[in-house]
Amino acid sequence: MTLRIHNTLSRAVETFSPIEANHVRMYVCGMTIYDLCHVGHARFLLVFDMVYRWLQTLGYRVTYVRNITDIDDKIIKRAVERGITIRQLTAEMTAAMHEDIARLGVLPPTHEPRATEYVPQMLAMIAALERKGLAYRASNGDVNYAVRKFAGYGKLSGKSLDQLRAGERVAVLDGKEDPLDFVLWKSAKASEPDDAKWASEFGPGRPGWHIECSAMGCTLLGEHFDIHGGGLDLIFPHHENEIAQSEGANGTTFVDTWMHNGFLNVDNVKMSKSLGNFFTIRDVLKHFDGETLRFFMLRTHYRSPFNFSDANLEDAQSALRRLYTALDGIDAPAIDIDRAQPQAAAFRAAMNDDFNTPVAFAVLFELAGELNRTRAPATAALLKALGATVGILQQAPRAFLQGGEAGGDEAAWIAERIAARAAAKAARDFAQADAIRHELAARGIVLKDSPQGTTWVKG
């Protein structure tokens, strides 16, 4: 079965065929790094990491670009608030991002360009748009894109210009000829720090958000490439504007397949700091390990709405524990997956059907059930090998069952309580030792004593 992907542009599931045989070029809109990554970011990062891994599993060479936006209104505001330079802020937040997503098993992309490294390419694209009459210099010093002069505007979102314009208003002195026009180059403001400004033929300023991704994508992948991804919220205006800029400047199709992951809610409500249901990846990793969060997010189809809750995370943790329990105690050799093997074929068919992870993961549980009955090393090897294609089941089972399923802070606390219990027993304070056991049991931690020491699992 060949790979089929839902294309937002055509609103249909299509057979995927790369422009260049055996080589897939993919761009995903990355982080705007002014703060720590939150669980919404984790979803898109894990979705496209899964896509990246599966394309490689199919034998494609993949050039994967995931950018970093390191100049933006929010970045400038946060740097000023903290009294540090933009570069200091973005270096700090980039390091934090890398640390957090590594714990989720997210692979590094082929290229991770920073917007500030591609300003010359952005200026060249803006100049090309101006020459073609698609950009104009506004009275306030900005350079704007003239949306109504691009015939295909609205094709990604599926809305007409009049529908898109409904409710829009032209801000006083914003310099726009039309409410839908968007900024390509923002003129420098006296109040902005010097490291937020670049010299240009349009005057000192900085790029708009949309032009950043167009320039980075076209520079690193070519003017026409295979896949562009991001969250559903980016369809309009960001990705719609990318198409207008790129196709307007280059005169060719920009991207063949547009992929978008569904929205994330927290307890069925949109995540918001004002509602108090906002969680960073680090918040979650204090209580759950990275593989559990990965498994949790990937077992829902990438285009479906995703509901984040403690109850659902705990359920995912228990499910992942069942897979590791099946593998525990069996020596599973590394293997090449036999495509003709029935479960391997079923897993491959599911993943090739628009990355249908719920069906693919059901195959993993079928294998785990068989493994519980037979304890066959070949079955364990296949379970691990299929899990590897989506970045799960690669830990030593006993290590996961005894510690990997807890977040770092929780695991450290458990180790400290076990040590305290051992000390109490050595002092013959058995009441205190029993109290610690009960304390751990109340948190779902089951202790197992043996001559070799005390181990634990989550019950």
Image (cartoon, grey):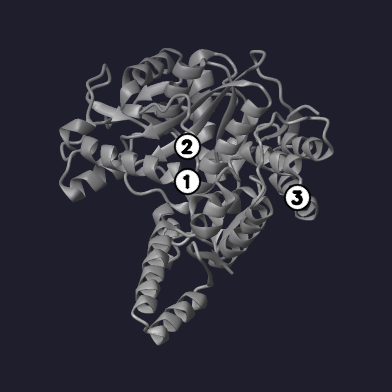
Q: Is residue 370 left or right of residue 36?
A: right
Q: Is residue 99 visible?
A: yes
Q: Residues within 10 Å of mark 1 (few under 14, many from 20)?
A: few
Which residue lies under the disc numbered 2? 180
For the residues labelled 1 and 3, say whether their Cβ atoms are less than 8 Å apart: no
Q: Earlier in the sequence, mark 1 or mark 2?
A: 1
| x 45%, y 79%: residue | 439
Q: Position of residue 154 (x, y in %)?
A: 59, 33
Which residue lies under the disc numbered 3? 375
Question: What amino acid is labelled 3 in the image?
Answer: Arg
Question: What amino acid is labelled 1 in the image?
Answer: Glu
Question: What amino acid is labelled 2 in the image?
Answer: Leu
The quadrant the N terminus occupies is top right
Residue 156 figure quarter: top right
- Between the residue at mark 2 and the residue at mark 3, the CA separation in whole angstroms equals 62 Å
For the residues labelled 1 and 2, say whether their Cβ atoms are less than 8 Å apart: yes
Residue 213 figure quarter: top left
Nearest to the observer: residue 207 or residue 385: 385
Query: Is 192 located above or below residue 1 in the figure?
Result: below
Q: Residue 168 got which mark?
A: 1
| x 51%, y 76%: residue | 441
| x 60%, y 63%: residue | 312
Q: Nearer the viewer, mark 2 or mark 3?
A: 3
